[in-house]
Image (spheres, helix red, strand yellow):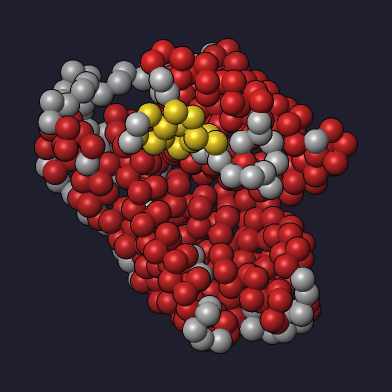
Amino acid sequence: MRKLLLIGAMGALLALLVSACGGSSSGGGTISVAKEGEGGAKAVNAACEEEPVAGGTLVYSRQLETVTLNPREIKNGNGDIFAAARTSMLKAMLPDEQLGEANSVLQTVREGLRIIAPITGAGLYAAFGGHTVAVIDAATFVGSALTLIALPFVEPPVAPREHHFLREASAGVAHIARTKVLRELTIGLCAALAVIGFCETLIFAIVIDGLHRSAPFVGVIDTFQGVGAIAGGLTAALLMRRMGDVRLSALGLTLFAFASFGFLIPSLAGVVPSVVVFGAGVAWVIIAAMTAYQRRSPQEIQGRVAAATNMLFSLPQTMSIALGAALVTLIDYRIEIVIMGLVTLVASAYLFTRDAEPAPEAGAAIAGTAALPVDPDASLAELDELGRAEEPATMEA
């Protein structure tokens, strides 16, 4: 678990070092370096030293083979690894009743940094240039890795490697599919994500066509969203204790939907409050969903479940981003906002009408897995059988 966290941190460090070599994104294209014998690596290093690589992208060619090293792709991939390991680590460190508070704190800090970091980065960039900013950013990942190494934490036993690759790779998806609450939560969230990606392009239409401002004003809107997200993070744990994680996810989607309708008002008086509510709703959904998956998944497959949810959520969201970009060129952006709001309301109604489990007590079994006697030497196949043995009865929260 700690190794995966270190891999994620160091991978992001590598990405930033490539960016530091890359310099300005306004350069004249990427560099292709033909490898001849053992001197190829030196040629790549020399090219990186002699000429900036546009946008931090390094292209290495050998005959007909081409490998592109892009820092954004490296950071995204290692971010997935880091997130899965962090989820498993929180589950091992904290009792279930404290997971909501921990996720709330992490989300609040993350949203606060989203407001502070761009301002700080812009100031450093103006004063010292892009290379210095990239190096400073890379140093923060080194600090993160060193902190993880020094953390006094005893890792739980690791699930033994499964001989069947497909079974091991699909263990997280299988657990979600057979756990009623997680299955229904996934269906509701994926339905909402099928339209939430519209926001990626809609925000520009709202700012330019609705508010009649220039595109950089999107940064101001993002700041207000961050304020709402911080408020959502600060209140999520309290609400989760009162109404449960599934219903908090539904309430977050409801806020998201009504905030979307607020974007139809072509004035700052309508858009700014809507963005704040929008940010709070998104924070509630993220915190509640993360906590729900952690509480209802055994420690042995926490990382696999986290990776599975990331994959399941990424698919509809990515498709909706592409669809939204196409629709905004074909129909009035306000029609797209209405579609997004209505579909999200349907998804929230679906989650509100599900039979939710009561909030877990300390040491209580969740989804028929946490309290099951598990042999530390059991294979994933045996863990699957334990999970299939009996699905717990549910009650109305």
Please tell me which residue is depicted at 53% across the width and 80% down the height of the picture. 329
Please tell me which residue is depicted at 52% across the width and 50% down the height of the picture. 287
Which of the 4 quarters of the picture holds residue 168? top left
**Residue 255, relative to residue 269: is it above or below?**
above
For the N terminus, the image quarter is: top left
Q: Where is residue 180 in the image (x, y as percent from the top left)?
A: 25, 55
Please tell me which residue is depicted at 69% across the width and 36% down the height of the picture. 23
Q: How many labels does the image show?
A: 0
Which of the 4 quarters of the picture holds residue 158? top left
Q: In the displayed structure, does residue 74 sit left or right of residue 19?
A: left
Q: Where is residue 129 in the image (x, y as percent from the top left)?
A: 80, 36
Q: In the displayed structure, does residue 225 sit left or right of residue 175?
A: right
Q: Where is residue 311 in the image (x, y as percent from the top left)?
A: 35, 49
Please tell me which residue is depicted at 48% across the width and 41% down the height of the picture. 73
Residue closest to the eye, 36 or 134: 36
Residue closest to the eye, 8 or 394: 8
Residue closest to the eye, 339 or 200: 200
**Residue 323, relative to residue 95: is it above or below?**
below
**Residue 197, relative to residue 151: is it above or below?**
below
* Res. 193 in view: no
Q: Where is residue 184 in the image (x, y as percent from the top left)?
A: 30, 60
* Res. 194 in view: yes
For the C terminus, the image quarter is: bottom left
